[in-house]
Image: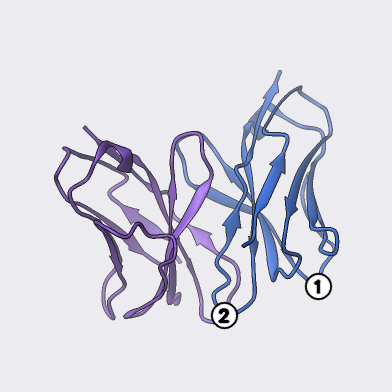
Chain colours: A blue, B purple
Amino acid sequence: KQEVTQIPAALSVPEGENLVLNCSFTDSAIYNLQWFRQDPGKGLTSLLLIQSSQREQTSGRLNASLDKSSGRSTLYIAASQPGDSATYLCAVSAPGGSYIPTFGRGTSLIVHP
Amino acid sequence: NAGVMQNPRHLVRRRGQEARLRCSPMKGHSHVYWYRQLPEEGLKFMVYLQKENIIDESGMPKERFSAEFPKEGPSILRIQQVVRGDSAAYFCASSPIGGTEAFFGQGTRLTVV
């Protein structure tokens, strides 16, 4: 059974810092990995999707890497801003027909001015 | 193309009542996933459906919970005889045939009083 762990569980940083959020998964036979953002009381916004054959994806100040063999992904946030404050969720999908995403518990990020 | 639509956004039910949560997938998507998010916890998979078929319901509680995705109309998650422990945010996601990226709705927040 796939298990997804995210470290740290919470992070509070001053504005402008570069951040690394970590995600690890126990079964390396994944199809893809997605990073989501969730604001308090809101839904999920997809940030980046990395296929298993890819090593990284970038969108603006966000960069996500994937090392399938070691079961790890990192989300790098450059020059953090208060608007980045949210919970960041990692989800992996496995092959086999269903691609049901399995989620970690998230990293709660606060960026203070 | 509208995103995944869930309604209602907020639902209050008294213990013992029934709750019906609706999810309209994105246009052209035929796969629907339901997740539950308890306070301070991650998203837990409940059920995966395709049109008129339940593909995987391994995350559904054995009693009181049911889901359907009819040929026409939205997917419905039904909770009978709700209890306080059912209070949570329920999220729906959809993906197209052969697609591997899940798109999430804004969720329905169920409160049982």
In the depicted structure, whether residue A29 falls above or below residue A76: below
Which kind of residue does numbered mark 1 sit on? Answer: Ser
Q: Is residue B45 left or right of residue B87?
A: right
**Residue A53, numbered circle:** 1
**Residue A97, numbered circle:** 2
Which residue is pictured at 74% across the width and 48% down the height?
A: A23
* Coordinates of residue A71 in the picture (x, y in percent): 79, 58
Q: In front: A78, or B88? A: B88
User: Do marks 1 and 2 both belong to one polypeptide chain?
Assistant: yes
Q: Quadrant of residue B110?
A: top left
Q: Quadrant of residue B31?
A: bottom left
Q: Nearer the N terminus, badge 1 or badge 2?
A: 1
Helix, strand or loop at mark 1: loop
**Residue B71, numbered circle:** none
| Chain to which mark 1 belongs | A
Between the C-alphas of marks 1 and 2, the distance is 18 Å
Which residue is pictured at 43% across the width and 40% down the height?
A: B38
In the depicted structure, whether residue B29 falls above or below residue A70: below
Helix, strand or loop at mark 2: loop
Q: Nearer the viewer, mark 1 or mark 2?
A: 2
The quarter in which the C terminus of chain A is drawn is: top right
- For this orientation, the residue located farthest to the top is A113
| Chain to which mark 2 belongs | A
